[in-house]
Amino acid sequence: MLVALMMIITADMALMGKSGASRTRINEKDGSVMIWIPGGEFVMGSNDGSEFEEPAHTIPVRGFWLGMYEITNRQYLMFVGETDYDMPDFWDDGNLNCPEQPVTGITWKDALAYCSWAGVRLPTEAEWEYAAACGEKQLKYATEDGDIGPGSANYSGVQGADKWLYASPVGSFPPNPFGIYDMAGNAWEWCSSLFQSYPYSEDDGRENLSEDIKALRVMRGGCYHYNREYCRVTDRHYHRQHLHYDYAGFRVALSDSCHACDK
């Protein structure tokens, strides 16, 4: 499975290199392939969704690196092996422990510990939504064409190309136009942000990483267990950061100090 995944990654990077559409880097610690997300402005939230998505508001986002894939069980096991950290919940569940499935059964604090080990960080809620929406394209779903169906994402049920009742191996469906996989469905993804009302501001305390252990943290993207509406780019989900869920995973991000890259 690892060889197959690396072949997929190599093919993805070759195509990107030919098109010049994206820049990639490999995080040496855990092997994460990261895509450069160019900065810009976009409309965050929606006036047509739940009350938690209101009001829609325009914000700037600085360029940053984002993991092409969700962190896998294989990668998380590397972290556990080097640090003697606790194994994730559900590790003995054959539906959830395949090497190239996204790791689940981890708390928000577990995701932070992994990021510290790997030299990366969690994306903010604004970064996550910006990347999922493909910036100014404002996609409704983080799929190849902005629409969703069983051929483009892993959400509830089994139909067509979506043959998984549980999480699918990362990269099983086409990426969004930024080249990021599985931002619609598969595993819900922890963000760094506290769950607070809009409008979003990174300076209002919601990016405080040392809040009460029982604080609510944002999850994004939907998952294999919930219907397609939870996969919308603007949908906001949350849970207490100290609890484990069989559908909660994460992907990694990285800031870039090279201002010339931020375009």
Image (cartoon, grey):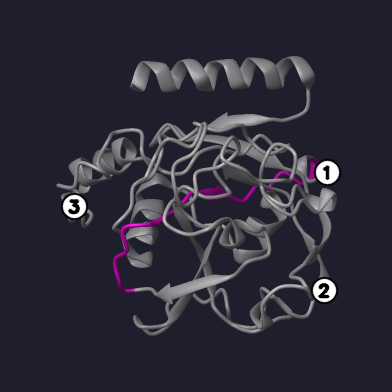
Q: Do the residues labelled 2 and 3 touch (CB within 8 Å)?
A: no
Residue drawn 47% across and 15% down?
7
Q: Do the residues labelled 1 and 2 touch (CB within 8 Å)?
A: no
Q: Main secondary structure of the magenta part?
A: loop
> Which residue is disc 3 drawn over?
87
| SS for callout 2 | strand
Q: Compared to 135, does 43 lie above or below? A: below
Badge count: 3
Residue 57 numbered tag: 2
The percent position of residue 118, horizontal first and vertical second, equals 39, 45
Residue drawn 51% across and 20% down?
8
Q: Quadrant of residue 210?
A: bottom left
Label 1 CA crowd tier, 10 Å (few <14, some 14–19, many 20+) = few
In magenta segment, residue 250: yes
Label 3 CA crowd tier, 10 Å (few <14, some 14–19, many 20+) = some
The percent position of residue 100, horizontal first and vertical second, equals 35, 33
Q: Which of marks 3 and 1 is nearer the N terminus?
A: 3
Label 2 CA crowd tier, 10 Å (few <14, some 14–19, many 20+) = some
Q: What stretch is highlighted in magenta?
A: 242-260
Cα separation, mark 2 vs mark 3, equals 40 Å
Q: What residue type is labelled 3?
A: Met
Of the 4 image quadrants, the one containing the C terminus is top right
Q: Which of marks 1 and 2 is nearer the N terminus?
A: 2
| SS for callout 1 | loop
